[in-house]
Amino acid sequence: MSAHDALERPGERLESPLCAVAVDLVILSVRDGALSILLGRRGQEPFVGQWALPGEMVGARESLDVAARRGLAEGAGVADLPVHLEQLGTYGDPERDPRMRVVSVAYLTLAPASAVSAVRGAAPHAVWLPVDRVQSRLRLAFDHARILADGVERARAKLEYSSVAAALCPEEFTVGELRRVYEAVWGVALDPRNFHRKITGTPDFLVPIGVTTSRQGGRPAQLFRRGKAVLLNPPMLRPEA
Amino acid sequence: MSAHDALERPGERLESPLCAVAVDLVILSVRDGALSILLGRRGQEPFVGQWALPGEMVGARESLDVAARRGLAEGAGVADLPVHLEQLGTYGDPERDPRMRVVSVAYLTLAPASAVSAVRGAAPHAVWLPVDRVQSRLRLAFDHARILADGVERARAKLEYSSVAAALCPEEFTVGELRRVYEAVWGVALDPRNFHRKITGTPDFLVPIGVTTSRQGGRPAQLFRRGKAVLLNPPMLRPEA
DNA sequence: CCAATAGTGTCTTTCAGACACTATATA
DNA sequence: TATATAGTGTCTGAAAGACACTATTGG
């Protein structure tokens, strides 16, 4: 009945083959107004020279989440700041790696651009690239284009009904900066006035810290920190096509 | 950079250990007005005699989706009718199976009760149990309680913004039967009048077949088939707590 | 001064939820 | 007849989107 039973009756109706298990990371940030992804160039076959998602093999006694966090710190050089990390999906096509069977558990990370400048030091070959340019012009290794597409769609959908957008902002941010995150991820322009009214009206999303900044030019804006709200109710819906 | 590279530099910073990979199935249906799940009793250690999700090991040259469909047909005996199948998440705690490392990819299936009566023949030990009774009174094997909880929550959420509820109805159904599906999955009572107006007003959700039935008693109701709509806009929101 | 961003107020339309009312079956 | 389910109409309140208007900075 349970899959685990098959371990004890090998050959009855299937082999119980072993696979390598990896985690791959879709690390998204907003840089210069564009949704961007952290990619590295492959140094070996297969797909030498092509861009690929950062990733790691899962250790023998390591949980998937821990492997993802390790990949974030080691492979991608992302500081352990308040970074959003969630499982995205698992990709197990038998042909996805030409060398051997590799089942890859993909994770999605949303990080403020600031938290990841540390990347320079730890992962010199990792580079931020705008997502739309990657999707329109680059060929990614393995099935990473598909994983990226799934990650981007997940991020776009999650901004609607959760407060993860704040995970893409620095620790202190203005309503305008938060709005530009939404605009970058969705690729649309939002009405600043309606956005302001709606976002400040959502309980526990934004916590004012009583200071203003004029770093955007124009009238100084209030600075906020992330509140404890996780779900957005009512949701912030993207404009329809 | 990419996880796949680690295959070629074993021991640099981690082993590249092999795992068994399984699929486990959360198969939900509505039976006698209650959201129910298909479970089997384990015949071997560990967890002998305890209830467990149906599942299969993934074949050496088999994709995850194909393994899930196979598990649905073979292990669970679910007919290959228009059954909803989607990946739910992957569970890889190193201790989840005491015998060896097993990474399990969980799938969620929503099927009409009718499509699965064939279960009797193919999987004599599989039984439908009401979800709330399972969650309140039974101990499931492995981490299957957690997987079940995630599956149920996914199903509840998906009913809001997609048309999967129709996947829990027989091929031809009335608005009232569809409403009772929502009520069973969410565990709440809905206003029949508002539900009717809203669901029939959603384009391409329901296709009338021009026939009525009085199998519920009372005034005969129109029969519908599933339309081609996938997303529900506006969504059908659950009443708040 | 002008340009740019921040923030408030107001109007219209859409929609959710409450519920009165009619329609048509079975017991 | 009573009771159950199907289906329509109407009202109210919440909220989305459009947009006029004020506020406060820098150049």
Image (spheres, coloured by chain):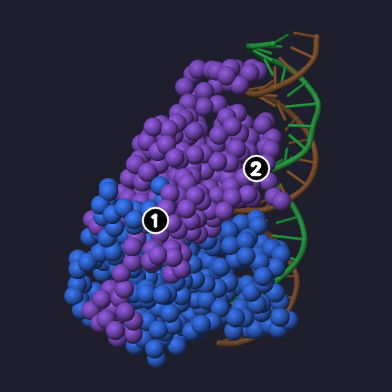
Chain colours: A purple, B blue, C brown, D green
The answer to whether B97 appears left or right of B32 in the picture is left
Task: For marks 2 and 1, give the CA distance.
Answer: 32 Å
> Viewed as shown, does residue A152 lie left or right of B77?
right
Q: Residue at x 22, y 66 (%)?
A: B100
Q: Amino acid at mark 2?
A: Gly
Q: Is residue A100 above or below residue B127?
A: above
Residue beneath the point at 56% across and 68% down: B164
Contact flag, marks 2 and 1 (Cβ < 8 Å): no
Counting from the top left corner in percent of width and height, residue B2 is at 41, 51
Element on which disc 1 rests: helix
Disc 2 with disc 1 on a shared chain: no
Judging from the image, what secondary structure is the residue with disc 2 in?
Answer: loop
| Amino acid residing under circle 1 | His
> Which residue is more in the foreground, A38 or B72?
A38
> Where does the image place residue B70, in percent across and percent down from the top left?
43, 79
User: Residue under circle 2?
Assistant: A187
Chain where mark 1 sits: B
Residue plotted at (59% across, 50% down):
A138
Q: Residue at x 38, y 53 (%)?
A: B5
The residue carrying pointer 1 sits among few (fewer than 14), some (14 to 19) or many (20 or more) residues within 10 Å by Cα, namely: many
The x, y position of residue D26, in whole percent, is 64, 11
- Can residue A61 be spotted in the picture? yes
Residue B54, given in percent of the width and then of the height, sits at: 35, 76
Residue annotated with mark 1: B4
